[in-house]
Image (cartoon, grey):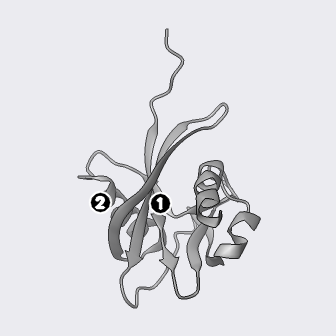
Amino acid sequence: MSDTKTPIVVACAVIHDSQKDMFLMGQRANHKHNGGYWEFIGGKSDPEDKDIQATIEREIEEEIGAKGKAMELVTRIVHSYINGPTLELHFIKFELAKDTKINPDPDVYQNVEWIKMENLMKINLSHGDHKFAQTLVK
């Protein structure tokens, strides 16, 4: 009998303002899994999504009301929570559409903010996102 879990595929948007060296991050609503933790905005892949890029474009629109374009895959990290799910996190470079407005769904995110690179490791990141953020600030 196998003890392995089938990972949940999650798309994570790496939205970076290179001029200000800031990332757009979301703080999960307190009633959600990992409530209060910050993360790269995104969500689970649906069977209707044709690929992981379609997932992130859909999730960005659903969760923060913004439009944009998925670019290339930056990296993929598998993270298993103790007594929780195993996630296959796909971190994807994402460009917001020009003049797009950010309108977060309060059921998902209690805060959405631009976080400076130098402060990325100072916020309370979810564990899988923390692993990725470490690669950015080394």
Tag 2: Cα neighbours inside 10 Å, few (<14), some, or many (≥20)?
A: some
- Give the secondary structure at mark 2: helix
Residue at x 29%, y 60% (from the top left corner): 54
Residue at the far left: name it.
50
Which one is in front, 7 or 66?
Answer: 7
Q: What's the residue at 33%, 68% (across, down)?
A: 71
Q: Which mark is residue 52?
A: none
- Are the residues tagged 2 and 1 within 8 Å (C-beta)? no
Residue 119 lies, in percent from the top left, at 72, 73
Q: CA distance from mark 2 to mark 1?
A: 11 Å
Helix, strand or loop under label 1: strand
* Rendered location of residue 89, percent (x, y): 48, 49
Of pointers 2 and 1, the one earlier in the residue sequence = 1
- 91 over 123 or under it: above or below: above
Q: Quadrant of residue 68?
A: bottom left
The vertical placement of 88 against 64, above or below, is above
Looking at the image, how many numbered discs can be counted on the residues? 2
Considering depth in this image, is 69 or 110 the residue closer to the camera? 69
Residue 90, visible in the rendered structure: no
Location of mark 2 (residue): 54
Residue at the front extreme, as displayed:
138
- Residue underneath mark 1: 42
- Of residues 128 and 72, the one nearer the viewer is 72
Residue type, numbered disc 1: Gly
